[in-house]
Amino acid sequence: MFRLARFLKNYKIQSILGPIFKMTEASFELLVPIVMAKIIDVGIYNLDKAYIFKMGAVLILLGVLGLVSSLTAQYFAARASMGFGTALRTSLFSHVNAFSHKELDEVGIGALITRLTSDINQVQTGVNMILRLFLRSPFIVLGAIVMAFTINVKLTLIFLLFTPIISLVIYIIMSKTIPIYKTVQKNQDEISTITRENLSGIRVIRAFSKEKHEQKRFAETSESLLKEQLLAGRISALLNPATYVLVNIATILIIWFGGVFTFKGAITQGEVIALVSYMSQILLALVALANLIVIITKAQASAVRINDIFEIQPSITDDGASIDNITDFDNSIPVIEYKNVSYSYYETAEKCALKNISFKVSSGETVGIIGGTGAGKSTLINLMPRFFDVTEGEILLYGNNIKKYTFEALRKNISIVAQKSILFKGTIRDNIKWGKKDASDDEIKKALEDAQALEFVNEKGLDFEISQDGKNLSGGQKQRLSIARALIAQPKILILDDSSSALDFATDAKLRKALKKNNNERTTFIVSQRAAAIKDTDFIIVLDNGEIAGIGKHKELLKSCEAYKEICHSQLSEEEIGEV
């Protein structure tokens, strides 16, 4: 947790004042037994009502001052811990957003969500409790022993004997429960993961009639969590009885020997009561410290997981990039050029996802990319906006290595419509404006018209509220809105990664016709498993097991590329193929 202390730098004053006021409260608390002793030894002994009322007023004053100090301490602790949590959450979110697809895939989205939510909340609670109790409990224990010494040295030996014994009992119980609490946290993480998987994949679960299987899996994990919690609870349940037995024994001894010393005149009755009160304060402080240790342990486990994420550095950055804008460009040179590009998802992978890929694309050309499942089509186009970096070779944009462009400059000029259409909660207008934040309604409608989405949008209206993940739209509607969002950005390069798979053939044909008509020197990549979707492009790249099996126009590939010929014959009629 110390490594996360930097997020308290803007709350140094609150982090100092919180413990100070808490110790101030403890100081007032330590004075209470002394005042009680005075009331008994002076007021009650002499039947002096005025003195009793006066000292009673002092007790009330100490209580009020203690309350004010406690509330002030809790206010500063809450301010510091909440500020800490906000700063940590913001920093971690920014750090995660800098991850490339590689890091996101390796860590897992579910794990990152857990870190950003429950783990940060756990650490935030730990910081709050540390500021409130970490100094208070030891201060109470030491203060009570010191105050006891001022009353009677011999009776204080009972404190010196029983305080370490009580501490040892607490330590033994905590040493047994802390590992169990760590296991509990892991089980809670697993339950969160199962819950997330089930809620997001409920349609698949129902489609395969796996409800009972998932219920059983959830029940087994919950049962494991229950057993661990019960075990921790049973061990923790020994804390109060064990400590109270020891305190009661100590109290008996204090009263016993206190009575002897009182009979001899070495100590007063009020002072005996004060010593008993100090013994109780020590017990409460140690129990509070034990609970604090549990909270700190949980926070520490969460802090380790958070630090693990901070230690992961993005493998792809635009540090050192010098080109931050693409304005003037030479149409005489290729817009995109792949030069002997190879890529592997893992360093230890025996086989590359792409191998020795080379091709050039000029301004205004439309390129089709086709191949079987796992051929490397999506990998090929994901290298262009630097979602991944090439393992070997280089990719040139207008003659410059894409690594020379800042992310903003590169991705502002490359619009990609992914296989899975992602829409965000909000209106249709808001979603389309992701492509161009100052787009007018006329521009939005033009983009919707080109994407073949204007008809259904006119029925719903631009202010139609899209639910989370676009669940109140069909697959085809989501794809067309995603295409419109990409088109409105007016990119120099448009990538459609199998983004018309949910469209019927007629709508798909209209879409391709509109894209070709309103090209505006835009270079377009159409990735598809449909031969019909790419056969009329300027040229086609055929991928097979990560390598280029052929490059050329439709009719050329029918003669020269066996893989392309097989795809066409499996999907199209002889008339559609147009074989010559």
Image: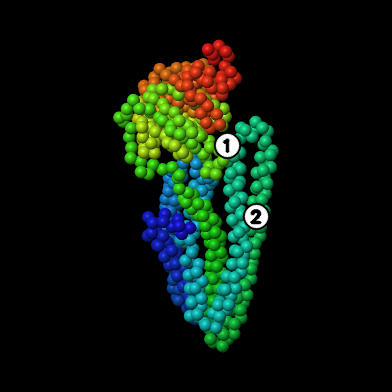
Q: Amino acid at mark 2?
A: Glu
Q: Nearer the viewer, residue 359 or 535?
A: 359
**Relative side of 396 to 215, left or right:** left
The structure residue drawn at horizontal position 61% and vertical position 43%, both measured from the top left corner, is 194
**Relative side of 169 to 15, left or right:** right
The structure residue drawn at horizontal position 44% and vertical position 37%, both measured from the top left corner, is 393
Q: Nearer the viewer, residue 316 or 63?
A: 316
User: 314 above or below 285?
Assistant: above
Q: Do tag 1 and tag 2 residues touch (Cβ < 8 Å)?
A: no
Please give the label number shown on residue 228.
Answer: 2
Please give the label number shown on residue 320.
Answer: none
Colouring: rainbow
Q: Nearer the viewer, residue 270 or 312?
A: 312
User: 41 above or below 578?
Assistant: below
**Residue 200's quadrant in the figure?**
top right
On the image, the x and y values in percent for residue 75 come to: 43, 57
- Secondary structure, mark 1, is helix
**Residue 244's quadrant in the figure?**
bottom right
On the image, the x and y values in percent for residue 1 come to: 48, 58
User: Can residue 422 be seen by looking at this rendering?
Assistant: no
- Secondary structure, mark 2, is helix
Q: Nearer the viewer, residue 258 or 211?
A: 211
The structure residue drawn at horizontal position 41% and vertical position 65%, both measured from the top left corner, is 20
Q: Amino acid at mark 1?
A: Ser
Please give the label number shown on residue 200.
Answer: 1
The structure residue drawn at horizontal position 53% and vertical position 42%, both measured from the top left corner, is 346
